[in-house]
């Protein structure tokens, strides 16, 4: 008599964003968020602008991007870019597809970005989100981020309340 095998936990990997199709996947996958906005074209342009900024940089010392894969398919990403203040790092374009949520992938992506920011001696990490993304707020709080500010974001044609979240790096270890 054999015993039934325990269900296996899906295995994911985090890799550098460096494969053909990665950047296009990021843009297309962010349609999940852009559909949340009445002004989805503005959101899509902001995502495209961030991707273009990353793609145009040849020196990767201060910027990084990663893809999460589950069973060989892309299911998430995150970018880490220099902040406007010289000592800050920005985590951008974090997304995990709905079918891959609640597996620890979002936290692993954030940890990867934070680790990268720490190696470049950033003092803190910032994230922008929209107040409409209530699940993101809970996730960011659980990952050690605090809400710094929220205000109407003038980049949108309608009233979108942008939220700026931050996490100091010296107080945290991601692993």
Image (cartoon, rainbow, N blue to C red):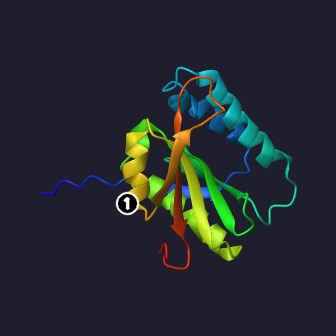
Residue 112 in view: yes
Which residue is at 36% across, 49% downward?
A: 102
Counting other residues with Cα less than 10 Å from the Cα at mark 1, is it few (<14), some (14-19), or many (20 or more)? few
Residue 16: x and y in percent read 67, 57
Residue 175: x and y in percent read 47, 75
Which residue is at 46% across, 61% downward?
A: 145
Residue 72 in view: no
Residue marked by disc 1: 142
Quarter holding residue 140: bottom left
Quarter holding residue 65: bottom right
Q: In the displayed image of the protein, which residue is found farthest to the left?
A: 1
Residue 40: x and y in percent read 59, 23
Seen from the viewer's position, the closer of residues 163 and 9 is 163
Please indicate whether residue 56 sits to the left or right of residue 132 in the image: right
Please indicate whether residue 46 sits to the left or right of residue 149 in the image: right
Quarter holding residue 98: top left
Judged from the image, the secondary structure of the residue bearing numbered disc 1 is helix
Seen from the viewer's position, the closer of residues 13 and 77 is 77
Which residue is at 72% across, 63% downward?
A: 85
Residue 158: x and y in percent read 56, 23
Which residue is at 58% across, 22% downward?
A: 39
Vertical relation: 9 (above or below) 168: above
Seen from the viewer's position, the closer of residues 150 and 2 is 150
The image shows a total of numbered marks equal to: 1
């Amino acid at each position: 008599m054999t015993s039934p095998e325990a269900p296996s936990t899906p295995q994911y990997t985090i890799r550098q964003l460096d494969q053909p199709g990665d950047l296009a996947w990021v843009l297309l996958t962010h349609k999940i968020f852009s559909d949340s906005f009445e002004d989805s074209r503005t959101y899509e342009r902001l995502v495209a602008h961030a991707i273009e900024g990353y793609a145009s940089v040849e020196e990767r010392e201060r910027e990084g991007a990663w893809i999460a894969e589950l069973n060989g398919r892309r299911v998430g990403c995150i970018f880490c870019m220099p902040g406007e203040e010289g000592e800050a790092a920005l985590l951008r374009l974090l997304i995990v597809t709905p079918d891959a949520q609640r597996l620890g992938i979002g936290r692993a992506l954030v940890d990867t970005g934070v680790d990268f920011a720490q190696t470049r001696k950033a003092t803190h990490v910032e994230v922008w989100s929209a107040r409409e993304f209530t699940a993101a707020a809970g996730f960011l709080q659980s990952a050690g981020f605090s809400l710094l500010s929220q205000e109407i974001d003038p980049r949108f044609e309608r009233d979108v309340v942008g939220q700026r979240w931050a996490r100091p790096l010296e107080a945290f270890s991601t692993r």
